[in-house]
Image (cartoon, rainbow, N blue to C red):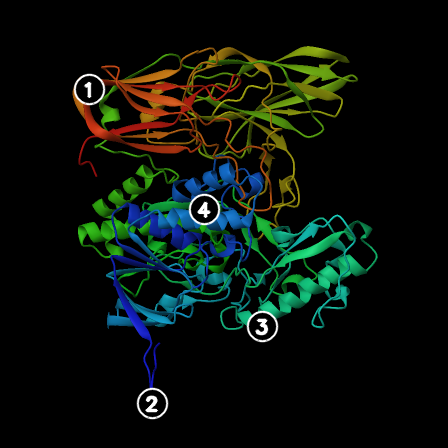
Amino acid sequence: MHLSPPASHRELRTVRHDADLVVVGGGLTGTCCAITAARAGLKVILVQDRPVLGGNASSEVRLWILGATSHMGNNNRWAREGGVIDEILVENTFRNPEGNPLLVDALLLEKVVAEANITLLLNTAVHEVAKHDPATLAAVHAFCPQNSTAYDLRAPLFCDASGDGIVGFLAGAAFRQGAEARAEFGEQFAPVQASTDLLGHSLYFYSRDTGRPVSFTPPAFALRDITAIPRWRQLNAREHGCKLWWIEHGGRLDTVHETERIKWDLWRVIYGVWHHIKNSGQFPEAANLTLEWVGTIPGKRESRRFEGDYILRQQDIVEQRSHPDAVAFGGWAIDVHPSEGVFSPQPGCTQWHAKGVYQIPYRCLYSRNLANLFLAGRIISASHVAFASSRVMATCAHVGQAAGAAAAICRRRGAAPRDLASGPLLAELQRALLRTGQHIPGRRLQDDADLARQATITVSSELRLARLAPGGPRRSLQSGVAMMLPVGPGTRLDLTVRADVARAAELRVELRQSSRADNHTPDVTLAGQVLPLPAGNDQAVRVSFPHVFSDERYAFVCFLGSDAIQLHTSEQRVSGILSLTHQVNLAVAKSAVQSPPPDIGVDTFEFWQPLRRPAGHNLALELAAPLAAFAPVNVVNGIARPTHQPNAWVADFADPAPALTLRWPEPRTIARVELMFDPDFDHPMESVLMGHPERRMPFCVERYRLVDEAGQVLVDCADNHQGRKVHILAAPVTTRTLRLELNAPSPTVPAALFEVRCYGPGAE
């Protein structure tokens, strides 16, 4: 028994934690930042004001994780972000292809608690900061109502990944809200006059079929006049969750301080929407549906944006400007929403895509006036227009990993965040990110510690693509169909496809390329021909172009015709080879051709996208001259995904025992081997709601062995589904050879490997 006499005043129990880095905000951004820093050896405190991790991706909000892949609705091929967020997305797809949001929570918690260097504080809100001097943070103070404990959290470095920027705000960091005037950055899409308008919040609901009729009595606060929502006719009984992202509100309010008011307004709308679906009589199919879940905290889009040494802007996105300090990338559309949200008569969003992905500079990731504060997530240094693209979760998480890696270098080198913006420390940061699987467009990994770069590489076979065998379903040319084929200097394409023709028709074929070698928008037509085809099935159609390519890139062979023509497809799939369709993805575009107004600084171009599996078969074809783009040297070229080329060694389809051997002239001592397989970077892997037909990506090698020159099996993996695999050997091995033996993923998919790296003991 404990008795406590009356007192005039009591203090909260206070616990102090000291660390190398305090990360405030446990959404995907802060989670990826904390994991990255912890794996690099830092002691990290991760502070999250909610009971679970994930932020907008968690079961509390239930928004799917997306980034540059944009539902496969743009021309950003192989654009999933890589690094820690990729590890999470691949694992979630393997465990949770149905998209259960509760399992996303569990996976994120598992990933964080697996890191011994992370101290996780859930249900803990930061409310105060302390400073050494006007430019230097010393501590953040937080409170957890669940255990009635105050926390004094101290570190030399801090990362604000809180979404609203609570640390930066309290510490006096320069920030912005609203839209800049067009003249400030020369952004043609910006308003002529500066505006306080913002993107609003959203709440979602889930419904469930109970198998018997269910009635619904709306709460008194529910919206009764559904016509107050101008788009009410778009409501239906099938869609729920974040497919109703356009139920948005708050863009004309203070999205920081009026969030509770916005939440109540959204609850009013959601219960009114469900009242309409259940009780209007317009949806008899909803008779057995019940309202299973309604969000209790809004998913925020926009509030504060903090200023770094550089402010990302529209031109960086549309022109894909190059930055020497690039550490991450984006690729979502410039996606603005009407500030009135669900009550606006305008479309729920206006999305304008660039022709490819864009770099995000490191100078956007730290405060310009606080010496030890990193910025990550949607609060990074960006204009309102650029923020409309960079704000999405996978991009934010990618940025969070960059901030975590930067913090590790700062601690190791005794540097401040700004010191990494140029020179040797910047090179070290970019190298560290690339080594951990993060893709940086335009950057190759140059790692002198990698012993694989010193080896002679031989393989059991090398795919020289001469044929994709027929046997797949027919593809109608009601929409255009294209094959992306890797070409190099001196390549001339001469190929044969097979067609079924219902009635005499003309087949138009165009040879295209992208205006940039590392883009995948076929916006330059090199040659074309029109081929009259008689009626008849299984016709061999030869297409030969005189154009000779002068550099390495992808060529697009585009077939355009009518629904009278069907092309034969193949069941064979190859890493770095895709078929495309000229069509609109209504999730992210309004038309198969992006046609912006002429004065907003956005390009006009066509969308050519893969179909999702199990569709998306390659065309069956035969090439007069085989394509040699899958050489073993690709595994040490410093790029671990398709870009302007496949960047993979691919074994021949007929190879019964694919193997790659590293051979050194003198023995080398190996302590760690890192491998990069193909987890299909073109797949968006939406984390919730949308189901996926596969748990394992069809290109990813499931079984492999690593053997030394004495025949000793160093690694024997029989159940892989991840792209990046790191093997720390039980004991370092001294050998002249390492042999990697792979099993092909399936009879129709040859074994492929993007990268192999080897390190000796003590290598950083």
Q: Which mark is residue 735?
A: 1
**Tag 2, which secondary structure?**
loop
User: Quarter holding the N terminus?
Assistant: bottom left
**Tag 4, which secondary structure?**
helix
Q: Which mark is residue 107?
A: 4
Q: Which residue is mark 2?
A: 8
Q: How far is mark 2 from mark 3, CA to CA?
A: 36 Å
Location of residue 608 (image quadrant): top right
Q: Nearer the viewer, mark 2 or mark 3?
A: 2
Most extreme residue toward the right, as rendered? Answer: 281
Question: Where does the image place residue 125, in percent across and percent down from the top left?
Answer: 40, 67
Q: Nearer the viewer, mark 4 or mark 2?
A: 2
Q: How far is mark 4 from mark 1, CA to CA?
A: 38 Å
Labels 1 and 2: the sequence-earlier one: 2
Q: Nearer the viewer, mark 3 or mark 1?
A: 1
Question: Which amino acid lies under the numbered mark 1 shown in the image of this protein?
Answer: Thr
- Of 475 and 87, which appears nearest the observer? 87
Labels 4 and 2: the sequence-earlier one: 2
Q: How far is mark 1 from mark 2, CA to CA?
A: 74 Å
Q: Would you place residue 524 above or below residue 380 in this image?
A: above
Q: Which residue is mark 3?
A: 261
User: Quarter holding the C terminus?
Assistant: top left
Residue located 63% across and 27% down the image:
481
Q: How far is mark 4 from mark 2, CA to CA?
A: 46 Å
Q: Nearer the viewer, mark 4 or mark 3?
A: 4
Labels 2 and 3: the sequence-earlier one: 2
Q: How far is mark 3 from mark 1, CA to CA?
A: 67 Å
Question: Are discs 4 and 3 less than 8 Å apart at CB?
Answer: no
Question: Where does the image place residue 136, in percent across and percent down from the top left?
Answer: 25, 67
Location of residue 503 (image quadrant): top right
Question: Which amino acid lies under the numbered mark 3 shown in the image of this protein?
Answer: Arg
